Amino acid sequence: MRFEEAFDLWQQRSLTQEAAAQLLGVCERSFRRYIDRYEEDGLQGLMDKRMEQVSHRRAPVDEVLRLESLYRDRYRDWNVKHFYERYQEEHRGSRSYTWVKKKLQASGLVTKGRLKGKHRKRRDPSPIVGLMVHQDASTHEWVPGKRWDLVVTMDDANSEIYAAFFVPEEGTWSSFQGVRETIEKCGLFCSFYSDRGSHYWFTPEAGGKVDKNQLTQFGRAMQQLGIEMIAAYSPEARGRSERMFGTFQGRLPQELALAGITEMAAANEFLRKTFLPRFNKRFATTTRSRQCLCADPRSTSGRYPVSASGAYRSTRQLCLLSGQSPANPGRSTSLPLPQGQRARPRVCRWLYGRVLRASQAC
């Protein structure tokens, strides 16, 4: 209707073609094209002919039905991102993530999520691997009818998971186990970040500050290893761990159900051999620096970790825990460094953006 008005004014010579085109918000050349199409077919000729054509990129109906059937039969409770990764890897899907999500939403298999609010400013991750390690546990119904604790030890710099396993309930033993697996994999790290659980810290007053002088059994072990412990005072302070557990809870139960696993031993085996390598490949990031501050445990002469069954064990037991020979504590038996990695100088803490290098006795 607006074109008819501009066309009539142009025919009455009240407007030039340039002014009429400006009125319609098009160029002068487009206005002349509209004149030709209007004179041939009327207003119908001004309709966009592409609206009547089927896109050559449109997916066949059979492909859409196969996608919906695959999700409905095998991956019913998976989130779209998780399903899309499996759709690409195992089922050779060639469509985009947005296409898959819209098709599943259109069929009613997936509901649209609410728009998330603006998040507060996040703390930047550590610039170097080995500077800070997180450890936390999540209680969840990982398999139907069973609630286990998943204990995870993660590097703050690149979000790589060093250790993850299921236990009936987290405690001192599970904390030691996570730290040991981390040391065996990458070496001694600089600082340990955790919540205020009673196996990590002694808190004189409920909800108050931790007592850094009265150490727990785990705290004494970290002190012997020269690892600084840092306490978190709110879930928001552990945001990186909380978001990681959200990803675990959205993926791991579905993976265990797909594999038909219901027992803890089989779940730990699946977690170690199948899930973690895939998870680290997908979510581990790169750091600003290629350096690694993890130190060779063999270089920390005279400092050994503490076992979970006693505060201070004999030299023989401590050596066995640290992977060193009881006859010769300086000789390691089971804790070699990863291939190509050399011993790094110890770092005690990160302060004001500078790495403070300390002696072996720090």
Image (cartoon, grey):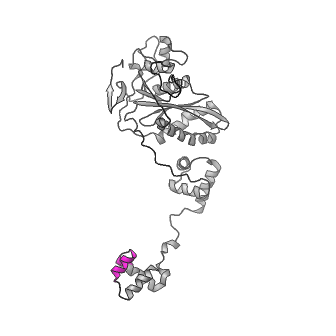
**Which residue shows up at 40% across the image and 82% down it?**
6
The answer, for residue 286, to whether it is visible in the render is: yes
Above or below, 34 against 312 in this view is below
Residue most extreme to the right: 145
Above or below, 283 against 317 in this view is below
Q: For the magenta stretch, what is the residue range?
A: 13-30
Judged left or right of residue 90, residue 237 is left
Above or below, 231 against 331 in this view is below
Residue most extreme to the bottom: 12
Please provide percent x and percent y for residue 251: 56, 42
Please provide percent x and percent y for residue 78: 59, 47
The quadrant the C terminus occupies is top left
Quadrant position of residue 187: top left
Name the one closer to the observer, 97 or 232.
232
Residue 18 highlighted magenta (yes or no):
yes
Name the one closer to the observer, 350 or 339.
350
**Which residue shows up at 51% across the image and 53% down it?**
97
Please provide percent x and percent y for residue 191: 42, 27
Please provide percent x and percent y for residue 259: 62, 40
Above or below, 29 against 106 in this view is below
**Which residue shows up at 39% across the image and 35% down it?**
126
Name the one closer to the observer, 230 or 149.
230
Residue 59 highlighted magenta (yes or no):
no
**Which residue shows up at 54% across the image and 23% down it?**
172
Report the number of discs: 0
Type of secondary structure dominating the magenta stretch: helix
